[in-house]
Amino acid sequence: MMIDKSNTDQAGFTLIETFVAIVVLMITVLGPMMLLSRALLDARYIKDEIVATYLAQEGVELMIYQRNNGLTASSLDPDSHSCQLYLDQNGEGYNCQRAGQPTIFTRTIEIDNSFSENKVEVTSSVTRSNLLTGREVASRSIIYVISQ
């Protein structure tokens, strides 16, 4: 009894065909996965940038609040709001009292009163330090104060 070998040699995939099929499948799956991974990193970066911008603007507004409560140019206290920022326990705001969860944001407020006796420049800078980058966002405003 003889077996016809010509039919059995062509049944099924060879090892090379299987390897090529796996490589093509990996390329079609890994491409979108890499795009999704990059999109998630970009979204986190943009979120941090927006939060830093709002915190810098808040620093200027805190100095305006002090001014509205009758403080003069020499008595404005930027150090009371310059700090490593912490997220409140309820997650609704940021504070300097070391209460809550530490964040990557540090705010520095500087006051330049060399313009005139009733005008100061307030610069609020927020630096964020995370694994991606250490960027700084600044908000600058000139406010009028009660003369000394």
Image: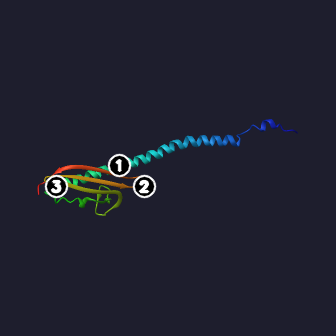
- Identify the disc placed on residue 67: 3
Residue at left offset 61%, top offset 42%: 23
Of the numbered discs 3 and 1, the one sitting upstream in the chain is: 1
> Which residue ends up furthest to the right in the rendered image?
1
Q: Few, some or many C-alpha atoms within 10 Å of disc 1 (few <14, some 14-19, many ≥20)? A: some
- Comparing 145 with 93, the one in front is 145
- Coordinates of residue 142 in the picture (x, y in percent): 20, 49
Mark 2 surroundings: few (<14), some (14-19) or many (≥20) residues within 10 A: few
Contact between labelled residues 2 and 1, with CB atoms less than 8 Å apart = no
Looking at the picture, the colour scheme in use is rainbow
Q: Position of residue 147 (x, y in %)?
A: 11, 55
Q: For numbered disc 3, what is the local secondary structure?
A: helix
Around disc 3, counting alpha carbons within 10 Å, would you say few (fewer than 14), some (14 to 19), or many (20 or more)? some
- Residue where numbered disc 1 is placed: 49
Position of residue 110 measured from the top left corner of the image (x, y, whole percent): 24, 56
Q: Residue at x 18, y 56 (%)?
A: 66
Quadrant for the N terminus, please.
top right
Q: What amino acid is labelled 2 in the image?
A: Leu
Residue drawn 44% across and 47% down?
Answer: 40
Please give left or right for residue 32 compared with residue 82 in the image. Answer: right
Mark 1 to mark 2 CA distance (whole Å): 14 Å
Residue under label 2 = 131
If you read the primary sequence from the N terminus, does the residue marked by circle 1 or circle 2 appear first? 1
In the picture, measured across the screen, residue 141 lies left or right of residue 70, that is right
